[in-house]
Amino acid sequence: MAVSFLSRHFVGEFMRTFIASVAFVATLTGYPAFAEEAMNEQPTRIEIDQQSKTFTFIINDKAVATLDKSGLHVGDSITYGGTLTDAGADALKARSTDSTEAADE
């Protein structure tokens, strides 16, 4: 009888400890701030600065390009296989308007 009581007590205590541990780990894992911190530690990422309205492209923890209202700024070379076309500002505005209208439909 004493063995039965001790084994039930041990199993109950073990289960309570196990459930509390799992709940604690789940809380830490599901917390969005920890996920964001882990994402910021990536060596390759895109950082968004709402204040200056820019996107900064980072590769191996080094800023390699910036995109803002005035354009794309790249410090090193750009390699491409097609052609580059200067369509002008009016063509880009028209294309932007067309895609906005298509999205509304």
Image (cartoon, helix red, strand yellow):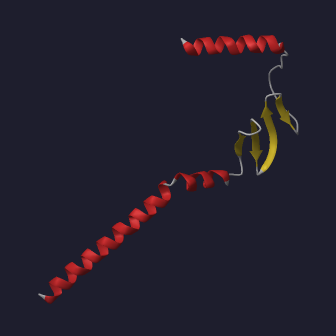
Q: Position of residue 60 (x, y in %)?
A: 76, 50
**Splitting the image into 4 quarters, where does residue 11 fall?**
bottom left
Can you say which quadrant of the picture contains the N terminus?
A: bottom left
Placement of 74 over or under 7, stated as above or below: above
| Whether residue 79 can be seen here | no
Placement of 37 over or under 89, stated as above or below: below
| Whether residue 103 can be seen here | yes
Side of 37 relative to 70 (left or right): left
* Residue at the image position 29 percent from the left and 71 percent from the top: 15
Q: Where is residue 69 in the image (x, y as percent from the top left)?
A: 79, 28
* Residue at the image position 80 percent from the left and 25 percent from the top: 81
Q: Looking at this view, is 84 or 101 the one in front?
A: 101
**Outermost residue, left side:** 1
Placement of 96 over or under 60, stated as above or below: above
Side of 101 relative to 59 (left or right): left
Side of 93 relative to 102 (left or right): right
Q: Position of residue 22 (x, y in %)?
A: 39, 64
**Splitting the image into 4 quarters, where does residue 14 fall?**
bottom left
* Residue at the image position 63 percent from the left and 15 percent from the top: 100
